[in-house]
Image: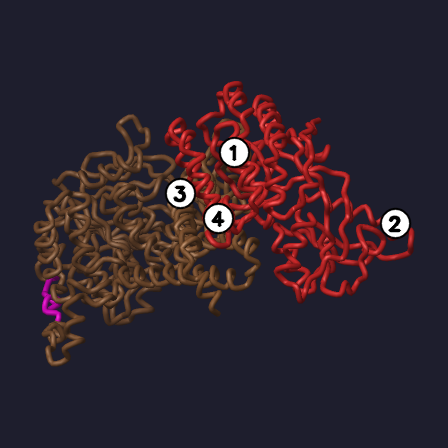
Chain colours: A red, B brown
Amino acid sequence: MSTNRFFPRIERHAAATPLHARRWMPVVLGIVCALAATGPRRAHAADMSAPPACQALQAKYPQFKGKTLVNALNPHTPGYEALDPKDPSKYVGFDVDLGEAIGKCLGFSVGYKPVAFAALLTTLQAGQADFVISDIYATKERAKAADFITYSKVFDGVLVAKGNPKKITGINTSMCGAAAAENTGFVEVPLVQNLAGPCKAAGKPVPTLQLYDNNAQCIQAILAGRADTYVNDVNTVDQAVKAYPDKLAKAVAVTLPYSVGIAVPKSRPDLRDAMVAALSALQKAGVEKALLVKWSLGAGHEEAPRLVTE
Amino acid sequence: MELFLHYLSLPYLLRGIGFTLEVTALGLAGGLLLGLVLASMQLSRFRLLSAFARAYAVVFRGTPLILQLVFAYDALPHIGLMLSAVAAAGLALSANEAPFIAEMLRSGVRAIDPGQVAAGQALGMTPVVLMHRIIAPQAIRAMVPALGNEAVTALKNSSLASVIAVPELTLRSTQLASSTFDFFSIFFASGVMYLVLTGAFSVLQLVIEALLDLDRPGPRQILARLLPWRRAPAATAEQAPEAAAAPMRVAAALTDRAARVAALARRPAAVEVRGLRKRYGEHAVFGGLDLTVRSGEVVALLGPSGSGKSTLLRCINRLETWDAGAVRVGGRYLGQREDGKPLSAREVARERTSVGVGMVFQQFNLFSHLSALENVAGPLRWVYGKSKSDAQRRARELLERVGLAHRADALPRHLSGGQQQRVAIARALAPSPSVLLLDEPTSALDPELVSEVLEVIRRLALEDGLTMIISTHQLRFAQEVADRVVFLSEGCVTEEGLAHEVLTHPRHPLTARFLQVMNADRPLEIPA
């Protein structure tokens, strides 16, 4: 059992009677921690206590306090954002916890809007969401549509059928002639497309791309034998291998020169600044590292907040 | 299997059905409303309106629903219209359904026999009454299967709302599949849920079809069928002889023709046609036709096919427009203000009822969704504001007069042609018109059914003293019943005069030739 399942209850409580709740919270949290003995202890300790710096931030950015801000997400990435299989009415994952922690720090509660990956930034631009924390890489291209605040490094994994029949060793000429499944809008798409030149130069067929709407469809494409590989975040790849240990394998892990970022509308610099400040406070207090550990992503993924803008 | 059953009963997925139905309902309701508007725009006389409706159909039928959804959700906020996900999905689905539904409505309306529309107009129905009582009830019946189809399509299309974050069944299924990796059990479960929903829609469609079925047995008949020893007595009445059609010696009553003609000449004009001109493109129908019919006079219009007999009758009733000239009925210009400007369809309808012109059509044109009784009683209620009991009493009286009291509850399609025409005559007589126009009332009838209709008309002439203009090919009937015969040829009156004289001693060569041909066809009808 993980503590985050208790979060919403506390959140609701806090929203209803904030002063009262703040006094209460340590008691409640203590009980929760004691009960939830199976979860990683450090995560609990870090999760629960909003860093003292947050008080000052709530005073500095009072406009978010008590509000509900909407997080647009593509909830098809277990570990980052997906439905809780035990209670599908909730979203769970590292990104979800981080968003909730930022919300708690700035005094807002988080609503969710599930959309296709390719529609994340469109939804933000349309004003249908306030921010995006959905394992989206902060690239210069995407920074044309929104401002990004980095929070995590990127490690990708190469998912293949068990035994790696095509002998794929990374995003390189070993993929020539292979069929790669990818999500529409993923940064891996151009990386695979860029192999066309080297493959031709080597006298090999170029890799073909199959674009899908979500993670599950990409994995199904490999299971069905339609695709040979799927390159995505290493944790996602690990989750898929865990789900189908007899059929899937991780060929290799690759490092990509990107960072994962929180997207905020360009029109709302105050929200961007508040988020940067809150994220810094959370990192300083060890909250993000604790969450990374809780979701088995590795504390080394943490990256200091940096703006990626156009 | 266990997983499948688990997901089939998972409240999270079941709650998605609520959103699926909400979006579908919004889409269908909005689509129906918008479709109604589009269909009426397309059917309207105004070019601009119909052009706009067509352009709308081209755009919204020609682009994928998924683009329309994304547009409603992501583009509209940029112009300040921030809709919730469900509302945006409802809007996009409505906009997408509307042109399809509009086409169904339009084809449903166009499938209505134009003769029934003309009959309704001739009875003085305004466009609204005509739509409400005659066109819509029949069009809706014809459209139910197509609308059922469309409802199922809309339900399935609602799954596309998943791309704009509507938490409906498909979105919930895909998210759940991503988080649990139970891809197939989840999609089988949601597939079964969709099947149950579409199945329910199909059942609903069948129930509605059955409820609207005109041949549906009434509760009493169902009882009779369930309890076979209780035989309804209705069967014997069906075979009752049609009493009224007994021939009468009408001709004898009309013998004193000279006196009658003299009396008629002193009567005021019931119908006056002056200088009537009309052309269909190159073809001139009337080149300045004149005709006067006195009150109480019975005039037979004779002439070869295409000579303009039907068109003339339809002009008198303002079912047709004309290019020049004037038509006055009961001293009033029908369809025109005193200053010559045309009246609206609604005003023409009101004029028709106040002047009192009834019309009987060659093809009967009974309202096919109404019983014989309702064909007669309905217009009395809807146009003349009679109470239900008054209208029914009058209708029964008239059906009795035409010898069809025992067929009052029959639908037109269960009546013979002769019976239908007799109901049509009763319907035309119900509002007590001052002028009755009969457009080849027996031409569409099998020969053995002609006499029963002619007999009814004969008695009208004799007993009611009704002003009648009858276009006919029945020379002997014309001679017996008509005071005067008017012979039309190529849109002109070539000869007119007392029936007996014109038919026995035609002066104009065209009349002579026509009579010769007619008599050659019917040697038994040679006039004495």
Of badges 3 and 4, nearer the viewer stands: 4
Q: Residues within 10 Å of mark 3 (few under 14, many from 20)?
A: many
Q: Position of residue A253 (x, y in %)?
A: 76, 51
- As measured in the structure, the alpha-carbon distance from the residue carrying label 2 to the one carrying label 1 is 51 Å
- As measured in the structure, the alpha-carbon distance from the residue carrying label 2 to the one carrying label 4 is 53 Å
Query: Is any atom of residue B88 visible in this view?
Result: yes
Label 4 sits on residue: A36
Q: Which amino acid does the dot numbered 3 rest on?
A: Gly
Image quadrant assignment for residue B36: top left
Image quadrant assignment for residue B223: bottom left
Kindly identify which chain the residue marked by label 4 belongs to. A
Q: Which amino acid does the dot numbered 1 rest on?
A: Ser
**Proximity of marks 4 and 1: CB atoms separated by less than 8 Å:** no
Kindly identify which chain the residue marked by label 2 belongs to. A
Q: Which amino acid does the dot numbered 2 rest on?
A: Pro
Give the quadrant of the C terminus of chain A: top right
What numbered label is drawn on residue A198? 2
**Proximity of marks 3 and 4: CB atoms separated by less than 8 Å:** no
> Which residues lie in the magenta part?
B242-251
